[in-house]
Every structure is written in C-alpha cells, then in structure tokens.
C-alpha cells in the first residue's frame, strides 16, 4: 500500500507536464496503453532446455466513456466500450535459467494487431518456494489509424509452486510512447502527436494445472499504478512441458 501511494504521488506530481490538456487526453492514452499491456501468463519458474508452452487466450479492457470516441477512430471499430483481443502465446526454455517468449494478438483484419516479446531470467529457483525472476518485455500495437503505441520495460516476478496451482505476482516499470493524430468532438483540442511517459504496473494471477506436465490454464489482472489507469484482464489455456 505504501509503495502504491508513492508511485501514484510521483505520477500525479509529473502528470500535468507529461500530458496536459483535457481529461480525455489522459484517459485515451492510458486506455491505449492498457490495450498494449501484456504478461506471458507464466510463473517465475524456468522451463529448461526442453520446455515450451503454446497457448491460446485473450485480454479484455473496459474503455472509459471519454476515451471511446478517440479509440473508435484509432481502432477503426464502431464500438469500443469493451475491447477483447484474442492472443497466441509462445514460450521456449533455453539454457537454465533463461526463457524467451512471443505474443501475437489481433482485433481483426482491418484493426489493431499486437506483437510482443520477452526474456526471463530466473534468479532464484530452488526446490523450496518461492521462485523469483526478472523479465524484460517489449510490446507494440500496429494498424492504428494515424498512430502507434509501444511499451518497453522490466518487471520482477515471484511465484509459489503448489500441487496443481501456482500463484504469482509481478511489479514493473515501463516506458510508453504513443503517437496519435486525430481529433474528437469530446476534446477541446487535438491529441498531441506524441507522448512519452514512464508508468509502474502491478499484476496478480495464477496457473492451474489441468493435465500434469501437459495442460495449464492461466488468469491474471494487470493494472498501471497511475490516475485513470485501466485494468487488463488476461487468460489463456496452454499445452507444453
């Protein structure tokens, strides 16, 4: 709680200089950032040289009313009160304790697409839990109308290995660059062509084993630690070792 208040205070202190303009500007950029946020939905455990995961899932973001007009134009969709993006997750273990992974998401043939990747290093993975790992992540939205959204950063992950159940939590900090050039009747001025800002993020989730060593189901909630941040709900079912 103290850490969250500290992060919120930092964002509020510098927020006006980063964004300025009407509240819809804040809301639009933070919602776009939420659409680009992601997690591999993996614990801190390393998969090892033979390990891999292939998963199908989706993310859901609820769009605030004051951001629906601008995002409807950017995403080329008539309705954006709730955006669900189907996703393909790929994770491959390299040499212990390093994993790499990719993600591809798509809203439709004529709308936004997400391409992302990460590298994970398990810094503590002894037989006795918990397990700790560090991740470097990058994500970008393609296909936006007159714009782009990209995010890169680092996160720390902790998880527990329990029978058929692995809860995990993560905290990270990310640099975001949004470039949008469009106007909306809800705004008193055009959105600035480009914004660049840092934002902390926290997440909590779990992996549930359906078939040991083969099938898992994962769920996670991600949220930026900043005013007007929009939570991201993610889920996937995966097969692998």
Image (tube, rainbow, N blue to C red):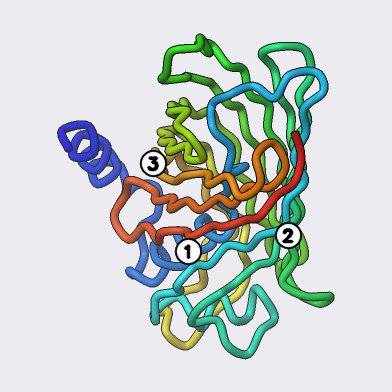
SS for dot 3:
strand
User: Vertical placement of 56 versus 18: above or below?
Assistant: below
User: Vertical placement of 82 versus 34: above or below?
Assistant: below
Furthest toward the left, the residue is 2
Going from the N terminus, do you reach mark 1 or mark 3 first?
A: 1
Determine which residue is flagged by label 3.
202
Q: Determine contact: label 2, label 3, CB under 8 Å.
A: no
Q: Determine contact: label 1, label 2, CB under 8 Å.
A: no
Residue lying at 22% horizontally and 32% vertically, measured from the top left: 3
Determine which residue is flagged by label 2.
105
Determine which residue is flagged by label 1.
31
Q: Distance between the residues labelled 1 and 3?
A: 16 Å
Of residues 123 and 136, the one drawn nearer to the viewer in this rendering = 123
How crowded is the residue under tag 1: few (<14 C-alpha within 10 Å), some, or many (20+)? many
Q: Determine contact: label 1, label 3, CB under 8 Å.
A: no
| Apparent side of residue 175 relative to residue 171 in the rendered image (left or right) | right
């Amino acid at each position: 709680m103290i850490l969250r208040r500290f992060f919120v205070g930092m964002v509020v202190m510098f927020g006006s200089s980063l964004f300025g303009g009407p509240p819809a500007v804040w809301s639009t950029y933070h919602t776009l950032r939420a659409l680009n946020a992601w997690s591999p939905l993996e614990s801190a455990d390393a998969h090892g040289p033979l390990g891999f995961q292939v998963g199908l899932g989706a993310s859901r973001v609820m769009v605030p009313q004051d951001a629906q007009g601008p995002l409807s134009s950017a995403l080329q969709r008539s309705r954006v009160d709730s955006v669900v993006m189907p996703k393909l997750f790929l994770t491959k273990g390299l040499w212990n304790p390093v994993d790499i992974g990719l993600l591809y998401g798509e809203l439709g043939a004529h709308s936004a697409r997400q391409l992302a990747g990460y590298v994970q290093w398990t810094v503590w993975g002894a037989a006795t839990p918990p397990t700790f790992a560090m991740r470097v992540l990058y994500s970008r939205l393609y296909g936006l109308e007159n714009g782009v959204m990209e995010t890169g950063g680092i996160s720390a992950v902790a998880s527990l290995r329990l029978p058929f159940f692995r809860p995990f939590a993560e905290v990270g900090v990310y640099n975001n660059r949004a470039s949008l050039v469009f106007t909306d009747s809800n705004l008193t001025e055009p959105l600035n062509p480009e914004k660049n800002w840092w934002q902390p993020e926290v997440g909590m989730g779990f992996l549930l084993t359906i078939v040991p060593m083969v099938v898992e189901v994962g769920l996670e909630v991600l949220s930026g630690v900043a005013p007007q941040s929009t939570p991201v709900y993610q889920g996937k079912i995966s097969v692998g070792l």
